[in-house]
Structures are given as structure tokens and as C-alpha cells.
Image (tube, rainbow, N blue to C red):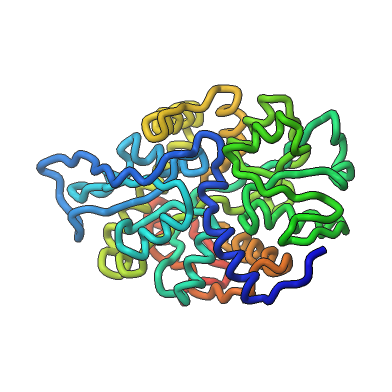
Amino acid sequence: MSAPRPLATLRTLAALAALPLLLTACGYGSEATDDGGKQTAVAADAKKLSADEVSIGYFPNLTHATALVGVQEGLFQKELGGTAIKASTFNAGPSEIEALNAGSIDIGWIGPSPSINGYTKSKGKNLRIISGSASGGVKLVVNPEKIKTLDDVKGKKIATPQLGNTQDVAFLNWIAEKGWKVDAQSGKGDVSVVRTDNKITPDAYKSGSIDGAWVPEPTASKLVSEGARVLLDESTLWPDNKFVITNIIVSQKFLKEHPDVVEAVLRGSVKANEWINANPDKAKASANTALEKLSGKALPADVLDPAWKSITFLDDPLAATLDTEAQHAVKAGLLEKPDLKGIYDLAPLDKVLKAAGKPGVSDAGLGTE
């Protein structure tokens, strides 16, 4: 086992490794890059809000279906009226955080690890989490010929997307709770943790270089379509089977200057999630159509269908689970204990939810007040 590294070094490595969550949290079919922004059509007589346009960022991934469907079905534009949407897609967490910091986007769909890192690296000055978007969609899938029970994972080679990303931290925490030992940096120990980009994980599985993977959808279902078996759904490890995989962030500057626009986007998000949950088959087809437009590749049914079923779309940011995920990273030695107080501002969301007759949500003590 390698010698311990200074905590500052670990924090730097964790930040670099954890930020690309969105690329790794999406996997198969997720190779689109920033498209430079595409503006939606606005009716000539529509009334503008306080900004001419709002720039939003997201990924061509099922875990970002709230944004995919919201744009595809015109749900955001309906709420924004004459304020146009400029939509950009990204292929990695750091690029979206950089775009937010630079003012290239105002609002983004993003995962917990880049949210935490973006907030702490700026000392709490660049972003706020303003809503949830999706939960779940992460599984431990294995070669059924080599691994039949959870205990059989010991001594095997299991892939995670990247050192320090959300799935990597979750797997390391699960290993620790089993009483097994693994050096977080090298991945060596009672289990071999093999950091593998989701794009090549299926090939690694087919070649036999890994025995399984702790990965998000739709990578998990892609592996299952090629003979792997789901051994564990990560949602079963969390209270109420829910944990944050995607939330919505906003530039603090934009939130302060254009609260009406932020509320309009949130209304669109709430209505998108409502429509997705009321019309799952139509929503699945809509999301896949959007994926094909953005990435040039729709997901096949044997991947799309099981992947879609494992993701829950919701407005609650599940703040307590984000805090727990941060604690797991600290426990693994990959992150210095972060101060997350103020990372959430859920007042705009609560206002929208109240107007829609829905209950408010909790910031788990990590709000701005």
C-alpha cells in the first residue's frame, strides 16, 4: 500500500478527479461537447422578463432528462415568455463550472461532486444549488460467472468511472463498510478498484479486464445488455431509496440580478418533472429524441428501458444525501472536510412549489439562512 499523501495533495487530487462527474455520471452515449449555445425561438408578442435571455447548461444524458424534456417540449420557454433560452451542452463537470464562473451560462444541471467542488473552491462565492432534478440510477453490475454474491466481490476487479467521483466514493465507502481495506489512491487492496472511463467500460468488461463495475445509468444497463447482472442497486443503501445524482445550480450574480428568470426556469423544471412522472413512456421517448439530436446517437431499447426505470425525477435536492456524499469522500481520505453552509438557496423553489400546491423541501441545514 502506498505511503499516505499530504491532505492538501489529496484535496487537490479529489477536486480534479471529482469535478468531471457529469461525464462519468452519464457514460454510454455521452460524448457531446459544448455546442456554443442554441437559442430557442420566441414568439414576437411574448413578454420578456428582466433578462433578454437565460443561458442554461446540461448534458446529453438520461440523468439530465428534466432539462432534455423541458427544452424539447417547450416547458421552459412557456414559463419564460419573451425571454429566450440559450442552451449549451457539456461533456465534463469542470467545463460547466468554468462556464458558470465566466458567465457563459447562468443555470446548469450538474451532479453533487462538481457542485461541492465548485462551491468550496470559490469559498462559497460562485454558485448556489437551487433545486433537485434526479435521484438514483447507479448500480453494481457484475459478471455472473465470477461473482454470485456480494461477498464474492472481494478479490475481484471492479471498475468505477474515475478517482474521487461520486460513484468511486460510494464504492469505496461500501467496501469500508464491508470491513475490507483498499488504498483509495491506488485502488489496490481487498478489492481492485479500476478507474475506467464509462465510454470504454463495456469493452473492458467484454475483454475480461474487469469483473464488474459500480457505474451510473445508462452504462449499467449497457453492461447488462452484454451479459452482466445487477448485483446491487445503490438506491437500496439510502434512506427512502433516494440520493442526489443531478441538481440545478445558478450563478449567484444571476440569481441576485434576475430572480424572476430563475423562478421561471424553476417553474419549468417542476412542470417538466411533473410531466415526466405523469407520462413516463412519452417522456422517455422525448428524452431519447433529444439525446439523438444532441449526441447523434439514440439509446437502444434494451439499454434505455431499464436505465429509465432506475432514475427518479424529483424537485427535492435531497440535501442530506449530498452532505453524506461529502462525508464519505472525507472518510475515504479524498477530500478535506468542506464547509457547505450556504450551498443551497431553496427559497425560489419553495415559492414555486407553494404556488403549485406542493410541499417545500429541506436544505438539511446547508442553506443561506
Q: 198 or 82, which lies in front?
A: 198
Q: 107 or 113, which lies in front?
A: 113
Above or below for 291 versus 340: above
Quadrant assignment, res 40:
top left
Q: Residue furthest left?
A: 45
Q: Position of residue 139 (x, y in %)?
A: 69, 41
Query: Residue at the location (68% across, 69% down)?
Result: 330
Q: Position of residue 110 (x, y in %)?
A: 47, 53
The answer, for residue 286, to whether it is visible in the render is no
Q: Position of residue 78 (x, y in %)?
A: 26, 43
Q: Is residue 281 left or right of residue 42?
A: right
The answer, for residue 344, to whether it is visible in the render is yes
Quadrant assignment, res 345:
bottom left
Above or below for 306 versus 183: above
Quadrant assignment, res 260:
bottom left
The number of callouts visible is: 0
Query: Residue at the location (60% across, 41% down)?
Result: 198
Query: Residue at the location (34% across, 46% down)?
Result: 88
Query: Residue at the location (32% across, 56% down)?
Result: 105
Q: Is residue 298 left or right of residue 171?
A: left
Q: Residue furthest front?
A: 2
Q: 128 or 296, which lies in front?
A: 296
Q: Position of residue 291 (x, y in %)?
A: 43, 33
Q: Is residue 265 left or right of residue 166?
A: left
Quarter of the rendering occupied by the N terminus: bottom right
Q: Residue furthest top?
A: 301
